[in-house]
Amino acid sequence: MLTVKEAIEKRRSIRSFKPDPVPDALLHQIMEAARLAPSGSNRQPWRFQIIKEGSLKQQFMKEATFGQAVLANAPVIIICGSEMLTFVKRHKLAPPNSEYYGAETEDPEELKKFIPDANMYDAIAITHMTLMATALGLGTCWVQSIKPGAAAKVLGWPRHMTVFTALALGYPAEDPPARDRSSMETILIKEGQKPV
C-alpha cells in the first residue's frame, strides 16, 4: 500500500474505469477511512450510499445526473451526503455536549443554515476516501454535477438528509499526468506579509 505522501502525489481524477468489480473488502477500507475523518465537535454528519449495477444505478443516472460517462462507467458510485439532525441541539444523533452550536428544532428551514458546515465535513471524509482508494490501487472522480434533490428522491433519503456529491470509484483504465499546481509562493502568505 502507498504511504500517505505517495497517495497524495499519485491521486488523480479518473474518468475512465475498467469494468472489474471492486471487492467489498476494499470498499470497507475506503468507508473506514471516511468514518475516521475529523469533524467539528465530532458531529460526523456524513452518510454514504454505495450503488453498483442494477436498476437503482440506472434510475440514478436517468433522474439525478446529467448523463456523465464517468458515473455511468464506474463500477461503484458512492453517494455522499449528510444527516442534518446531527446539527440539532440535544438531538440523539448530535454529539454529546453540543448545546452551544446547532439548530434549536428539526425544522428543515432552520437546518439549511448548517448545510455549509455539513458539506465541509463531508469534503474532509471524501478526501480521506479518495486517498485511501489511491493507496489501494483504485481511482476516483468527485462529481458535483448531479441533481441533489432528485438523487435524494431516487435513493429514498428523508428530508433531513441532504445529498452533497457523488464519487465514482473503480480500477483506473487511464493514467493521466499530474495537472499544474500553484507554487508554494503563491499559496503561502508569510507571517507579516500582506496578500497581493
Image (cartoon, rainbow, N blue to C red):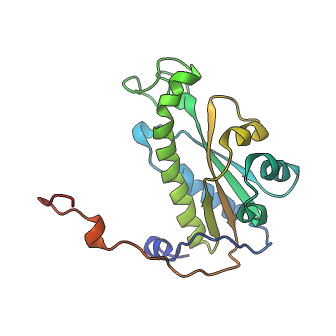
Quadrant where the N terminus lies?
bottom right
| Relative to 31, residue 8 above or below | below
Q: Visible in this render: residue 94? A: no
Residue found 55% across the figure and 23% down from its top: 109
Left or right, 143 with reference to 23: left
Left or right, 138 with reference to 95: right
Looking at the image, the residue that sits furthest to the front is 196
| Among the 4 quarters of the image, the one containing residue 29 | bottom right
Left or right, 71 with reference to 83: right
| Relative to 10, residue 79 above or below | above
Residue found 61% across the figure and 72% down from its top: 136
In x, y percent, where is residue 143? 63, 57
Left or right, 17 with reference to 108: right
Q: Visible in this render: residue 21? A: yes
Count of labels in the image: 0
Q: Nearer the viewer, residue 133 or 97?
A: 133
| Among the 4 quarters of the image, the one containing residue 68 | bottom right
Quadrant where the C terminus lies?
bottom left
Looking at the image, the residue that sits furthest to the left is 192
In x, y percent, where is residue 175? 62, 81
| Relative to 17, residue 103 above or below | above
Q: Nearer the viewer, residue 178 or 161?
A: 178
In x, y percent, where is residue 58? 85, 53
| Relative to 16, residue 189 above or below | above
Residue found 21% across the figure and 58% down from its top: 195
